[in-house]
Image (cartoon, grey):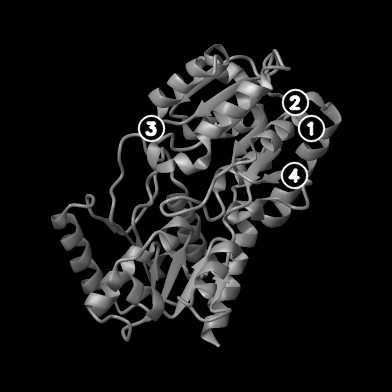
């Protein structure tokens, strides 16, 4: 059994990195034993975060200087007194601790990478740490190829382990209106008004997820469709801006904002969706690894539409479970949505395939097994 010190920037919120960290921590605990995995989180639980309790060994209180200092002290104490075999870093910025305190010779080091944090510019010591860690785990092939092509890591030096979905929780259902959940969010009945759903942080820092483009696309969809509605699920500082856009495009009466979605209701939202859209673009501060929400959506039977500029494209298998498009091809985006709204056979076919793809490629069991194989490989 290996002793693993797992350092997370924060594993208590609903963001994709936090979710990946939680799945990974659970997998490592099951593989190596819970007593052999110490988890330190820089961020603490906060209101509006992940509702289900998640146990860590210790957490700091945030990103203040004092909180970071306490975090570093705890890391150093664990390294020198607990003596882990592996220091596992949940985010590239945490490599700076290994550089500043020369910890590379104290244990093997493993770094998770995802997407935009890699191609958006790294602080000098972070880049040094990125190059020096022993192993890198990427959540998608796109990011792995990027860091190899840019010469940050040697060719084939990165292990790709796709994100995963809890397939016991995110399941399809024959009923789209379970317990009329939509009423508590002040949303229309999805049977009467087919949902075009997007879900995530509705903030300007996440604008690359295509919220503004989706609004424009929807304004074209309604020209020939009088039933569908656009649902923005989540919270963030972009909501007022999006509401203004809805007014400008004259679709405000068919655009809805759910606010924060409770964890228990997430599968219900996905099941209610006729189509799930998260079409991101890539650039500095923009882009995705492989985003989790489309994976959860298709596990619940919703066909998905994603972008072709980043790791999102890896969620699509030969257009069986949805569409992969240029994020700026709004006409194509419109046609994809229309095909799923207008063609019942197409929807049923893609819905069935979406469930199958999620089960074959994105199960937690497969995720855990890949981690087990990876840990065995680095022992050779």
Residue under the image location 70 percent in, 13 percent down: 226
For label 4, the SS is loop
Residue under the image location 43 percent in, 81 percent down: 134
For label 1, the SS is helix
Q: Measured along the vertical axis of the image, is residue 328 above or below residue 181?
A: below
Q: Does the CB distance between marks 2 and 4 fall below 8 Å?
A: no
Q: CA distance from mark 3 to mark 2?
A: 28 Å
Q: Nearer the viewer, residue 170 or 133?
A: 133
Q: Where's residue 347, x and y in %?
A: 79, 32
For label 2, the SS is helix
Is 198 displayed left or right of 152 in the figure? right
Provide the residue designation for mark 3: 236
Provide the residue designation for mark 2: 341
Q: Where's residue 197, x and y in %?
A: 60, 30
Mark 3 nearby-residue class (10 Å; few <14, some 14–19, many ≥20): some
Q: Which mark is residue 347?
A: 1
Q: CA distance from mark 1 to mark 2?
A: 7 Å
Provide the residue designation for mark 4: 321
Q: CA distance from mark 2 to mark 4?
A: 15 Å
- Chain-order first, disc 1 or disc 2: 2
Identify the residue at the far left of this view.
66
Q: Measured along the vertical axis of the image, is residue 366 above or below residue 231?
A: below
Q: Does the CB distance between marks 1 and 2 fall below 8 Å?
A: yes
């Amino acid at each position: 059994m290996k002793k693993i010190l797992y350092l997370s920037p924060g594993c208590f919120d609903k963001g994709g990195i936090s979710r990946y960290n939680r799945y990974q921590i659970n997998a490592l605990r099951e593989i190596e034993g819970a007593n052999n995995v110490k988890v330190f989180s820089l961020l603490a639980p906060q209101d509006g975060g992940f509702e289900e309790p998640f146990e860590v060994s210790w957490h700091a209180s945030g990103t203040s200087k004092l909180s970071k200092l306490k975090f570093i002290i705890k890391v150093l104490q664990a390294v020198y007194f607990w003596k882990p075999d592996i220091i596992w870093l949940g985010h590239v910025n945490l490599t700076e601790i290994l550089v500043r305190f020369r910890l590379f010779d104290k244990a093997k080091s493993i770094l998770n990478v995802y997407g935009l944090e890699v191609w958006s510019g790294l602080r000098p010591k972070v880049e040094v740490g990125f190059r020096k860690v022993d192993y890198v785990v990427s959540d998608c092939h796109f990011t792995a190829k990027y860091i190899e092509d840019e010469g940050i890591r040697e060719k084939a030096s990165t292990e790709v382990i796709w994100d995963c979905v809890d397939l016991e929780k995110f399941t399809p259902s024959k009923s789209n209106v379970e317990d009329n959940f939509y009423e508590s969010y002040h949303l229309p009945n999805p049977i009467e008004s087919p949902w075009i759903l997007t879900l995530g942080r509705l903030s300007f820092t996440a604008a690359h997820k295509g919220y503004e483009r989706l609004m424009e696309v929807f304004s074209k969809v309604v020209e020939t469709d009088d039933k569908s509605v656009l649902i923005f699920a989540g919270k963030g500082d972009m909501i007022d801006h999006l509401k203004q856009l809805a007014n400008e495009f004259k679709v405000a009466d068919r655009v809805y904002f759910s606010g924060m979605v409770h964890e228990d209701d997430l599968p219900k939202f996905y099941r209610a969706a006729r189509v799930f859209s998260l079409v991101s673009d890539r650039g500095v501060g923009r882009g995705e690894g492989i985003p989790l929400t489309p994976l959860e959506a298709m596990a619940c039977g919703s066909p998905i539409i994603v972008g072709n500029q980043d790791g999102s494209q890896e969620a699509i298998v030969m257009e069986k479970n949805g569409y992969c498009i240029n994020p700026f091809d709004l006409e194509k985006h419109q046609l994809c949505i229309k095909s799923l709204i207008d063609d019942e056979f197409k929807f049923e076919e893609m819905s069935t395939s979406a469930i199958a793809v999620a089960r074959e490629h994105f199960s937690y069991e497969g995720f855990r097994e890949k981690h087990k194989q990876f840990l065995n490989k680095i022992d050779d």
